[in-house]
Image (cartoon, rainbow, N blue to C red):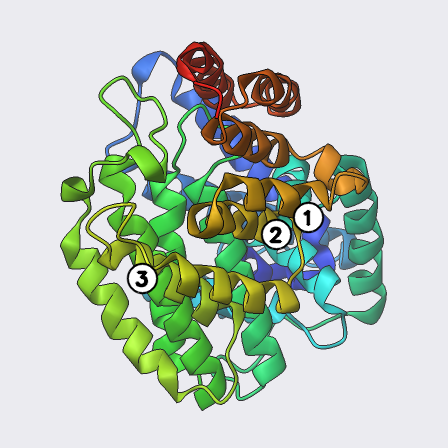
Amino acid sequence: MTAVLAGIFGLENLQTIEDVVQDTFIAAHQSWRYGRLPENPPAWLMQTAKNKAINLLRREKKMRFPEETPEESAPPGFEHLFLEHEIRDSSLRLLFALCHPDFPERSRLLLTLKYFCGFGNEEIGNALLMQPEAVKKALLRLRAEIRDKRIPFRVPFITRSLERLRTVNRVLYLMFNEGYKTTRQEEDINHELCFESVRLAQLLEDIAGNPEGTAETCALLALMHFSIARFPARTNEQGEIVLLVEQDRSRWDRRFVAQGYRYLERSREAKQVSRYHLEAGIAALHCSAPDLPSTDWAKIVFYYERLAAIDPSPAVLISRALALGYLEGPAKGIDALLLQESDEAFERNFLYHAALGDLYARNGNADKAAPHYRRAQTLTRSQRCKHLLEQKLARLDQVKPV
């Protein structure tokens, strides 16, 4: 819907687009109350947005040219924008438009996560490691800049710009990550968001005109498929989180694993190894191992070290420490994490404390594990994560000192 409206109003009118979308969903809430759903809700939403857009265009035209008689129909060339094929194609067109080279990458990511993915300030902050208030202010500045520069919506659908392709890949990566582990929802996985990310990445692979960018997209698709393969085992019958170390690997969907390997093979045409290649390689090693002890932890640690050279973020360094704990023992993983204890970004990260809790527990030190599990509980908003940490605290009674 946002993509279609952007084609009508242009990117300089993002506030108008937001208003039409918001009004459409308010109308849906009022009309669909008490279970009175239309036969085709998506079509109803698009038709309502279309009507509101037509009315808005008529009002604007009347204000500009009050002497003219308002037309009963939409402006020429307007109707086709609401056809099914145009709606589908507009999604990637909007994504490329929001990744305009006039903006630095951080600005492109802010715009796409907001207006393409539909993320709120909290989800954007989680993806880009920003505070929600900072996200809000940055978006206000960007809207004003787009309005002043009058950035066009119509951009080449097939682009050979490697820079723009890489930004689009990054957006789809962040979009998938938000679906893989949602920020707000009670469900641990937003399946719809994950599969929409895959669909768009597949469409991008089909139309991308740059071999290097296409290879990166294939690596990203490999990572997505390896991750989706584990979805059936990520929660139990009670809907509780099941971590990788405890998952029933027989429940992993081997069809997605096989597709992941096919995309990984196609990604080898890249001249440069991207973060998607490394993360897909790590995921492939997990998917190929019959059990946890058989995992090639040495290669996984090596991949994480290369990934840390590209992105030394808390998530990467925490994952590397956990892998090191399986390769050389939990004490080595603890030492690696304690190197970061003075960094506020780690201290405020619940995964950092959860990982330290796990490593101390595996090392037979329940007294040191417990405070970190409790600290992790205070830092996460997810009730599912809080419950999982509570279970880990309860199991510390069974930990025997080494």
Q: Amino acid at mark 2?
A: Leu
Residue 284: image tag: 3
- First in sequence: mark 2 or mark 3? 3
Q: Residues within 10 Å of mark 2 (few under 14, many from 20)?
A: many
Query: In front of the other: label 3 or label 1?
Result: 3
Q: Please identify the quarter of the rendering in which residue 305 is found.
A: bottom right
Which residue does the numbered mark 2 point to in the structure image?
317
In the image, 349 versus 218, the foreground residue is 349
**Relative to residue 254, is residue 127 drawn left or right?**
right
Which residue does the numbered mark 1 point to in the structure image?
16
Q: Is residue 87 visible?
A: no
Residue 116: image tag: none
Q: Amino acid at mark 1?
A: Thr
Q: Amino acid at mark 3?
A: Ala
Location of residue 290 in the rendering, given as x and y in whole percent from the top left corner: 19, 51
Circle 2 — which element? helix
Circle 1 — which element? helix
Query: In front of the other: label 2 or label 1?
Result: 2
Gap in Å between the C-alphas at discs 2 and 3?
19 Å
Location of residue 70 in the rendering, given as x and y in whole percent from the top left corner: 61, 54
In the image, 376 versus 87, the foreground residue is 376
Gap in Å between the C-alphas at discs 2 and 1?
42 Å
Q: Is residue 13 above or below residue 380?
A: below
